[in-house]
Amino acid sequence: MARKKIALIGAGQIGGTLALLAGQKELGDIVLFDIPAAEGTAKGKALDIAQLSPVEGFDARYSGSSDYKDIEGADVVIVTAGVPRKPGMTRDDLVGINAKVIDSVGKGIKQHAPNAFVIVITNPLDAMVGLMQEVTGFAPEKVVGMAGVLDSARFRLFLAEEFNVSVEDVTAFVLGGHGDTMVPLLRYSTVGGISLHDLVDMGWTTKERLEAIVQRTRDGGAEIVAHLKTGSAFYAPAASAIAMAESYLRDKKRVIPCAAKLNGEYGVKGLYIGVPVVIGSKGVERIVEVEFNAEEKAMFDKSVAAVQSLIDATNKIVGR
Ligand code: LMR
């Protein structure tokens, strides 16, 4: 089987972690790309991880570059380019800088990696992935945003801690935009197959404690920003994007919440927002439409409205 190629656009904290995880999973050969001013960082991290591979015992070739020609023919491109937020900022505050970055990166990907499955991590996520799809002109199923996996992982962790059980036995997902209006769905979450509603009845927790976990999930990114002070989370975002890349490259058909372009599903058309999807070798192979009750629908609609206003802001910035 031909070796796969993975291009990582942005050699910052997430880019370096992505490079390490992609190698450890032997997903393919890795090109770590950054702008000329950061080419040394890309090359240095690539070489450092390549030198780690004999110790860890995995087979992946690494290179660092600031020349888009080097991403030629990439099977997967993961985009982290742009700036992270700092304490006191929302993800939306990044739109002014990051929209221009995504506009430019999208043109490079369109020219040099026209067949790639593109995963966007840059914030504000839903607007940036929408912009990426417009700039590249790629089919919507080949351009996705990483957010739901990350938000759901946080939700699962907090629930596992609440019940003092393994994270492996907690199923939970978060829909909607990757911002303050995200929608963690308590009703679709289970612990060992038992609904949270039943666990409240069994006295394992209370509705109030679950509401606090929902809010902590919504604030999950900001909690880490407040600790780090110099930037935002990188380990969990990188692992989340790698899960999506792996499902695509290995045709695993995992059901993963991520930002996908809706075409009438959930009553929304032409906008990227977090929903569960099946990711396989064709990209987004299916959008899973779960049923909402009135309260969930109202939360989801609010999230759609928030994403729409960010898209409007993005379009003004890049003159679309
Ligand atoms: C996250 O959720 O960790 C990322 O979106 C980064 C951020 O700014 O919170």
Image: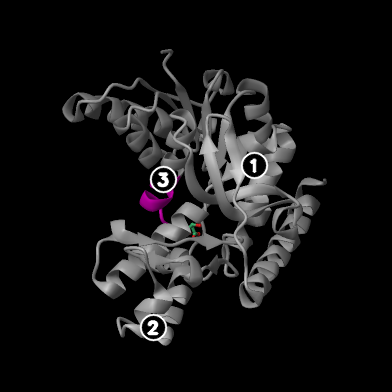
Report which residue position mark 2 lands on: 209
- Distance of mark 2 from mark 1, alpha carbons? 39 Å
- Is 26 situated left or right of 6 in this image? left
Point out the stretch of residues depicted in magenta.
233-240
Discs 3/2, front: 2
Task: From the top left corner, tell me how far across and down residue 156 is, in percent.
Answer: 37, 63
> In terms of image quadrants, where is residue 104?
top right
Task: From the top left corner, tell me how far across and down residue 254 is, in percent.
Answer: 46, 42
Q: Secondary structure at mark 3?
A: helix
At x 70%, y 63%, the residue is: 304
Sequence-earlier tag: 2 or 1: 1
Q: Amino acid at mark 1?
A: Ile
Return the residue nearer the eye: 279 or 158: 279
**Crowd class of label 2 (few under 14; some 14 to 19; many from 20; radius 10 Å):** few
**Crowd class of label 1 (few under 14; some 14 to 19; many from 20; radius 10 Å):** many
Q: Is residue 289 above or below residue 53?
A: below
Q: Kindly identify which numbered label has been placed on residue 238.
A: 3
Report which residue position mark 1 lands on: 102
Reply yes or no: does residue 145 show up in magenta. Answer: no
Return the residue nearer the eye: 143 or 317: 143
Return the residue nearer the eye: 94 or 304: 304
Q: Amino acid at mark 2?
A: Arg
Q: Amino acid at mark 3?
A: Ala
Sequence-earlier tag: 1 or 3: 1
- Is 2 situated left or right of 77 in this image? left
